Amino acid sequence: MDFDGIRGLTGAINASLADFFERESHYLREIGSELDPVADVLGHFLLDSGKRLRPLFATIGFLGAGGELSPEIIKATSSLELVHVCALIHDDVMDASDTRRNAPAIHKQFEALHDSEHLHGSNSQFGVASAILLGDLALVWAAKALHESGAPSQNILRALPFYDEMRVELMAGQYLDMYEQALASESVERSLKVARFKSGKYSIERPLHFGASLAPEFSAQVIESYSNYGLPLGEAFQLRDDVIGVFGDPEKTGKPAGDDLREGKRTVLVATTLSKVNVIQRTEFLQLFGRKDLDLSQIETLRSIIVETGALAELETIIEEMTFKAHNALATGGITPSAVALLEEMAIAATQRTA
């Protein structure tokens, strides 16, 4: 199977997801017309946007282990996007986020459905319950897409431990993130741990392992090289996400300006800021941080404190150092040269993005 770099792989993944969704949405609609909104909303969420980072890393992981690409392997690696869809839908519920990708979050869309159809009971409860179920359905679909991919059964069996570990680590990271908010933690070390499990391992390291394990043969050296590359790059990826959550352009992020500040996200950026503030800055920061009604001037006040303390500059240095560490890991051997080139390109995309 031929492909033209990252763009070609992304196109193949998008086509595979579209084919899978067409089959599965047809079955949903056959169950009953009440499920039409479920199919419609999931279809837009899955197909209209998304960077496909996890399927891309899994596919490159397969190539780096010496695998020869096929439509069946693309179907298997594309399944990871559905795990990500589950995580995003549930994350918006847990964070009480109103928007995602320049559109209402899933739970908000089903609140609106409740209102438009004049249903009984609480519209917010209906919205949250619907989003939980849609996220669960995406996770079920992920397993279904993998098992029905047509990849050799022995290869899928070999990949399952990595697939299972990835999902466990994702849920553990999500809980740690939620717990840190409730704890109001100011620990940089604890926030880094959340970044490692919520995003670092799940976004890059485990997809690479998963992809490698789908190859006919792969070595322990490749798995180790992928960890040495994936862990620092994954943390750098999450730290970039932290910066975007505070300083990102809403037109690019699809979320309101400074949304992480309104949500009171206890990120590495915030923990670093609180470790550097003076008494006056600390009082002003904590008075505003986490308030849902923050206006743009108050967001700018919080941003200014983050910059003035040097926290933003420190985070940019850490991102640069981690990315450099990931680059160096690619020289340790075991990964095919073509995959090394693709991973170099992915490192830039993961850490220099603006959304």
Image (cartoon, rainbow, N blue to C red):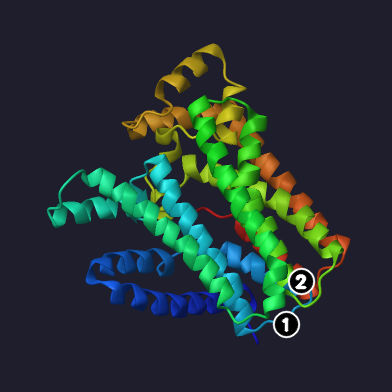
Residue 56 or residue 309, whichever sits in front: 56
Return the residue found at the far front.
31
Res 237 seen here: no
Residue 32 as seen in the image, left or right of residue 60: left
- Check the picture and name the quadrant holding the N terminus: bottom right
Residue 139 or residue 215, whichever sits in front: 139
Quadrant assignment, res 47: bottom left
Residue 239 or residue 224, whichever sits in front: 224
Res 234 seen here: yes
Q: Is residue 125 above or below residue 68?
A: above
Residue 273 as seen in the image, left or right of residue 255: right
Q: Is residue 107 above or below residue 143?
A: above
**Residue lying at 72% horizontally and 55% vertically, measured from the top left:** 230
Under mark 1, the amino acid is Glu
Residue 255 coordinates in the image, percent (x, y): 39, 48
**Residue lying at 55% horizontally and 78% vertically, measured from the top left:** 148
Quadrant assignment, res 166: bottom right
Residue 64: mark in rendering: 2
Cα distance between the residues tagged 1 and 2: 10 Å
Return the residue found at the far left.
118
Residue 324 or residue 104, whichever sits in front: 104
**Residue lying at 49% horizontally and 61% vertically, measured from the top left:** 139
Return the residue found at the far top.
279
Disc 1 crowd rating (10 Å Cα; few below 14, some 14-19, many 20+) is few
Residue 225: mark in rendering: none
Under mark 2, the amino acid is Gly
Q: Which SS class for mark 1?
A: loop
Q: Which SS class for mark 2?
A: helix
Residue 301 coordinates in the image, percent (x, y): 43, 27
Residue placed under numbered mark 1 in the picture: 68
Residue 84 coordinates in the image, percent (x, y): 51, 58
